[in-house]
Image (cartoon, rainbow, N blue to C red):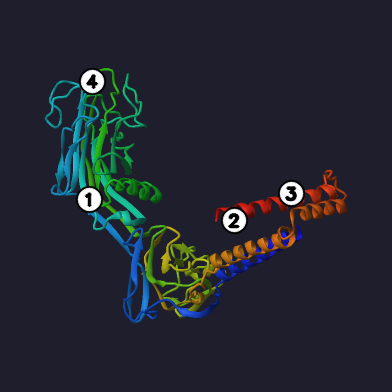
Amino acid sequence: MKWIKRLVIIISILILSSIVSSKIVSVSAREDYYTDIEWLRNNGFDNSSFWVIETSGDDQDLDGQITGGEATFVLIGEEGDYVFNANPPISDNWTEIPNPEFILPDIYGIDENGCYIGHEYLEEPVTNYFGVTGNQTRNFPSMTWEHSVELPVNMSDYVITSASVSAIVNGSGDTNLETPGDVLLSSGYIGVGDYARFSITVTDPNNIENYRIAYNKTTTLGKDISGSVGPNTYGERVYLNDTELVPVDQDLLILYLTKVLQYDYTNFSIILEINAYAEDNYPTYDRDTWYDLRIKNFSLSFTYEKKIDQFSSISYSQLGDVVNCTTITNASLSFDYKINSLWTSASPNSEIQTVINGRKYSETVKLDSFTPIYQTIEFSGRALKDLLTPNLSVAVSFQLYIADEFENTLNYTIFIDNIYFKISYMIFTPDPIPEPPPNYLPLTAGLAGGIAVLFIVFSLYQGILKFPVHVRKIRSIRRKIRRGARIKKLNIPSRADQVNMLTKMRLNIDELNVKSTKTL
């Protein structure tokens, strides 16, 4: 019915009003902006306070200190040389070591004129020139002398840039030596001939790798002068005058020294070697005599420069305060920089980097742009701002980064000063939330319910209950007729029946009254 619909709408409005009034709380807020707030302390490096110096990689390459109101990065350079002379070699410095692949010479040793051997190959089992019994197996003698070198520096941090080796040898032999060009007697032949060989070798302390750095092999020592010499006789004594050994190329010498030093960067060994080869040139007996084969002197020298390792770095770091804010709106960075002398072209990619909260800022300053006069660099923009995070500490690091490996002989000093790191940010501050208003929902619901009940009862009485039953039935029938609804047939008593019914009811009431009077 329409009145029920109206009632439902009224009650719903009351309840919703009560709910809304109980939930709505007035809240206001404030946005505070802070612009260009300096976030670092001790910007001018008045002392070392707040700054931490850290190195990565080879800490022998880089150093840093705060002095004179400046922070400095120092790239350490150095050059040096090493010279070893044995003029002549002396027994106190050299150790005789037999060559395990060959026999010992008849005589050998070190005297005031250097290292030497003497040997005579004689097939007959008789005493030879040096008092040693000859036999056919004694045709390849050798002796070595070894010296252990201890360098003044650890070469792991240096690069050899130049090197040289030299040695003087001499000797004497008999013309009974068969050399290319000699005319042999009947039945004699020459394959490679008789020769002496001198060599210088470098090796690591454990002899894992060894390399020959200078060498000489005779071809004419013993060459016939007055004619052919018989296979078992002496001819004339001939001499090998002072002769320089032939060194390997400098590049190879540097390589060999570098390779033997990789096992122990402060020690390696030098080996002097003299050996001889006596070819059996006759089908019967053969005599070949070396009176004296000698290494007269020896020298080895090299220069070196400091090796600067790639990816080494040194930095000045500071941990700033927490940026307590809602949004970081901007950031800017600036500092002054210079260098004591123009940067080397050997490392074009080295630079000063800025690292914020562990992430490198994209813009850097190449060292080859530094001059001896202070310059100022400024950074700003979104890329810098995005390295910051609200409500976290700000960790800032300025580092010298070595991007190339190179040799360096100079000390480079890089200066930085007047570092400013400014941050702009916004803080959103809501006002305190007030106490919520009283909740009238239960009371409103109760009142609405009571009103609804009273309204229903009143409406039922006015519309239905105040009429007699037959009137209500008639009203109901009338409504149905108006709507065109089908109705049941009504049985209405006749007038006579109604009079009889009322008369009977009256008689019954009178009878009841008489009975009640008698009883009293």
Q: Does the residue at mark 2 contact the one at mark 1 (Cβ under 8 Å)?
A: no
Q: How crowded is the residue under tag 3: few (<14 C-alpha within 10 Å), some, or many (20+)?
A: few
Q: Position of residue 406 (x, y in %)?
A: 42, 59
Q: Amino acid at mark 4?
A: Tyr
Task: Locate residue 462 relative to residue 28 in the image: left or right.
Answer: right
Q: CA distance from mark 2 to mark 4?
A: 191 Å
Task: Locate residue 410 relative to residue 488 in the image: left or right.
Answer: left
Foreground residue among 74 and 57: 57
Circle nearer the viewer, 1 or 4: 1
Q: Does the residue at mark 3 contact the one at mark 2 (Cβ under 8 Å)?
A: no
The residue singled out by tag 3 in the image is: 504
Q: Earlier in the sequence, mark 1 or mark 3?
A: 1
The residue singled out by tag 1 in the image is: 149
Q: Quadrant of the N terminus?
A: bottom right
Q: CA distance from mark 1 to mark 3?
A: 156 Å
Q: Is residue 47 above or below residue 6?
A: below
Q: Position of residue 68 (x, y in %)?
A: 33, 81
Circle nearer the viewer, 1 or 3: 3
Foreground residue among 291 and 88: 88
The residue singled out by tag 2 in the image is: 517
The residue singled out by tag 4 in the image is: 285
